[in-house]
Image (cartoon, coloured by chain):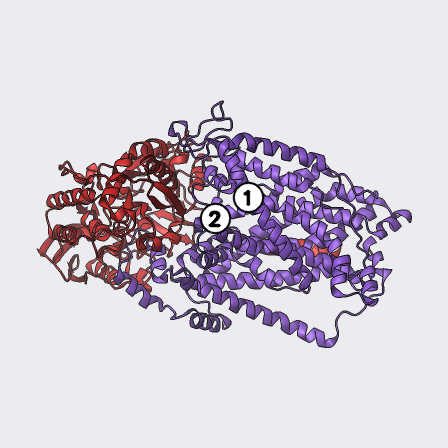
Amino acid sequence: MPRPAGALLALPLLLAGCFAPSGEQAADGGQRLALALAFPPVAALSPFSDDAALLTRMGVGETLVGLDEAGQPVPLLAESWSRVDDRTVTLDLRGDVQFHDGTPLDAEAVVGALTAAAAAAPAPRSIDGLGLTARAVDEDTVEVRVAEPDPLLVHRLAAPGLVVLATSAYADPAAPDPVGAGTGPFELTELRGASGATLTADADHWAGAPELAGVDVTFPADAAARTAGLRAGELDVAVNLPIAQLSTLTDTEVLSVPLPRLVSLSLDTADGPFADPGLRAAAVAAIDPQPVVEAVYEGRADVAEGLFDDDTAGGLDRPAVTLPPAADPAGTSIRLATYSDRPELPEAAAVLAEQLRQAGFTVEVVVAEYATLETDLLAGTYDAVLASRLYLGDTGDPVGYLAADLTCEGSYNLARLCDPAMDAVVAEAATLADPEERRAAALRIEAQVLSTGAVVPVLHERTHTGYAPTVSGLAVDRFDRLLLGTGTTVEE
Amino acid sequence: MTAAGRVRQVAPARPRHTPGRLRSGLLRPALTGLGAVAGTGLLVGALPWLSGDDPARTVLRAREVEREPDPAALDALREQLDLPADPVRGTVAWLGRAVTGDLGTSWVSGQPVAEVVPPALAVSATLSGTAAAVAVVLAVLFAWPAVRRAADGRADGGGAAGVLAAALAALPEFVLAVLGVAVVAVGWGLLPTSGFTGPEHLVLPVLALALPAGGLLGRVLAGAVREAAGEAWVRTWRAAGVSRAAVQGAVARRALTVVVPQVLLLLVGLLGAGAVIEAVFDVPGLGRVALAAALAQDLPVVQAAVALLVLLGLAAGGAGVLLHRALLGPAGTDGGLSPELPPPAPGAGRWAAGLLAVLLLVVLVGVLRDPAAQDLGDRLAAPSWAHPLGADALGRDVLARFAAGALPSVGLALLISAVVLVVGVAAGLVGRERAGLADVLNALPAVVVGIAVAAVAGPSLAGAAVAVSLVAWIPLAVHTRTLAAEVRASGFHLAARTSGAGRWHLVRHHLLPVVLPPVGRHALLRVPHTALALAGLSFLGLGAGAESPEWGRSLADGVVYLERAPWLVAVPAAGLVLLGVVAGLVRTGR
């Protein structure tokens, strides 16, 4: 081989040989579970980012309180709590909790964690701008206080962004490092960038020793990669599977959990053709969610009656919706945008566009990645936006969603709806303390919104988690925060 | 001494460098590198201003997808990030720090960039380096029948290998990747589906990248072999009774000189552009890092990634030039080579016409049908009398969409190929033989080019065409440059020059006739690839509309249903392969 050509072939070989670090093999026996989560950590698992939900799903970090099915707080790291006044609450901490680094969970550690969260820029969404302060009353009692009266103060402490980590994790208070610093059933022993994490069971966990010896986590962002890993037997559990591939999973079980997530078509009420309520009514009349649910979502979603699903309505009556008389579209041209990040949305948009065409609209469909669309979506560049939105936020409460999405000052108002009367009822609902009254108010506002035709509800999504038949004890959580627990097992 | 070495003695070698040129030869690359890093750094630094998206908002969204961009949170973030007031000041400050080795911290994750980008680059280098090496091996295998015939003094044949290579060159990488996972990893359980912790994880991604690249390089190499076979020394050697193996080796080596710079282009191009393949196999490479950071406008990460890629691109470009010279040996100086007018490519015109007729017939049958009519009851319906080629996820007729998509896919791709052929040949003839703009553009991640183009040209089909053209001319320019360097080193060129021929005369009568046929064939081979690339930027909103039946778009939409409805992928892929084979068979000789 001539030398230059040899050098050419050697060049790639010199470059080769760099792989991602692999996890260290656990020496001790016991069952390990291979888990694929949907997104790689964006901030090295700092809880002040979306990674917070990864921490709670993996069973590494825990919050002071949890949320039950109805969205009401339940004890977690705090055993009980009591309201001091409308701005203050005291929480009694569980006595037998240790962080994975061996230090005890005491009032001081909790105060440090909450103070770091409140000082983060920006603070976690559930407490941002509330002026939250925390103070140790005694060794296992914490007092939490906010600047303005707040009926949801305890709910807010359930947000994954407020997981409590050991003091050692806050060396950089802006980006806490959860390695070896959580309280959950599993200790995060190693994080390998975006490629994986190793968890080891914490035998001293307050709820008892976990059944599993450990968990090997990967973060394949591509949904098809998660499905393939499950089918090839490399994974025991994979979350967030695409509906299009569920039917290829023949040897695995699928756990489908309805989420408080609404897919809806928002019509631009500020300008363009849908500023005309008559045309909005025509669009509402044209849209039939049933074929979208049956074909595109293959029956694995629920037709949306309103903005909120029946679990959120909690058996309360939905007030009647009255739309203005529909106008004749007569070929009106509209642009309908959606994003490809959620795989079913582009197909759903094509079906809805066809329904609008049948009703007499001329429709152009625009699809791109959410990141490239967001500015235009919020600026009203498109006449209609098909979007998927969580409406119970971090607190399990629907009023925050109504304020952000449907009021004049709302920062995510895709319909660009601005009605002072609506703003007033939303503001009033936010002051209600009784959960049932809040839900009833939310349903009244829902009817009011639907009567404007600004938002056309299409369906409520479910999340699909695939697991090998040998796996049992996965948590079912409609807030999509919990997955692994002490009872999770995988048989031989 | 190898056989080819003996050719060198045809002309006396002349020192190529005077001491003065040597000094500037060291200074110039340094200045080029600095200029390229500063220029691309400024381009990246200007992305927020070009796109009009507030970096505070994009960074917040990258950290917390579902969070509403409320003004207080954005202000807090802006203060924390200390965003630059304008792109120039931001880039200058970044350059100042980068020169001292401080790459800063990521705006999204807060981690030091030096801990994020270099490891990802190492992973990507492993992947693309192995893919490039495998592609070279494949190329040599595909071209070997031509080498054997050349050593026998023939320039014909090699048809089967050529057709196979052209078909592979037309296959989309992501389809091969998904197919590999479904068949080899899931079906047979032979290899892991994803991850990147050991050599077993290399096989599938490398095959997905190397099969199309190897097919393309194989065709280019076979063309070069045929041209080398026509050179006078081959006849001399054969007449002198040099062994067949020696002639084969010399012909192969002579032909490789043309392909080497192409391989280096491929190697660098794959480093920052492998986002799709990296995502399919969950490989933590630079392509994904650059893509996520560019979408989040995480400027420190994008700037560092682009700076490293551009420097690598320039280094590889320079290495390509040096390797080309070294492979030519002293023959690469005035009068040392004798490239001749290539013989006409083997006559496969009838085959090409036949395949084209089949393609046209299918399209003609299909255009009579409605490509937009939905029937959700026929979702993913298998081929039947009602839908001869099946139906897609919305029950639309695949045959009708194939036909309706033919013109926008093939027509635009052909148009772009013609434009980049002209640009590439012109740039290759004018440009000196050294690393430059082409290597910089080639190294840039496609997403950076795409965002910049989308910002300037708006999200449209024209924008996609511009973004694709911006990089499509490069391999052709480098090919032209390589061939032109050989012509300029030839006796007939020297003779014409010394007898006072004008510049245009030299180009018209000596350069173009030698350069155009192989570069033209190369451009044709890339037509399917161009058709795919047009759909590759649709995630940025660039390209044909969301409901367009364009082939690239149909493939991307259908690949998720590969196992449930293989016809969604097979039909457009077959269209591209047929197109590739036809393009590979077309006669470009005289």
Image location of residue A66, percent across then percent down: 21, 47
Q: Which residue is mark 2?
A: B543
Report the front residue among A171 and A48.
A48
User: Who's the residue at 81% across and 54% down the image?
Assistant: B4
| Crowd around label 1: few <14 · some 14–19 · many ≥20 (10 Å) | many
Q: Quadrant of residue B480?
A: bottom right
Residue A148 in sight in this render: yes
Image location of residue B103, percent across then percent down: 46, 67
Residues under labels 2 and 1: Cα distance? 19 Å
Q: Which dot marks residue B153?
A: none
Amino acid at dot 1? Glu
- Looking at the rendered structure, the secondary structure element under dot 2 is loop
Image location of residue A310, percent across then percent down: 20, 37
Q: Which dot marks residue B173?
A: 1
Q: Specify the farthest residue to the right.
A: B240
Residue A173 in sight in this render: no
**Chain B: drawing colour:** purple
**Chain A: drawing colour:** red
The chain that hosts pointer 1 is B
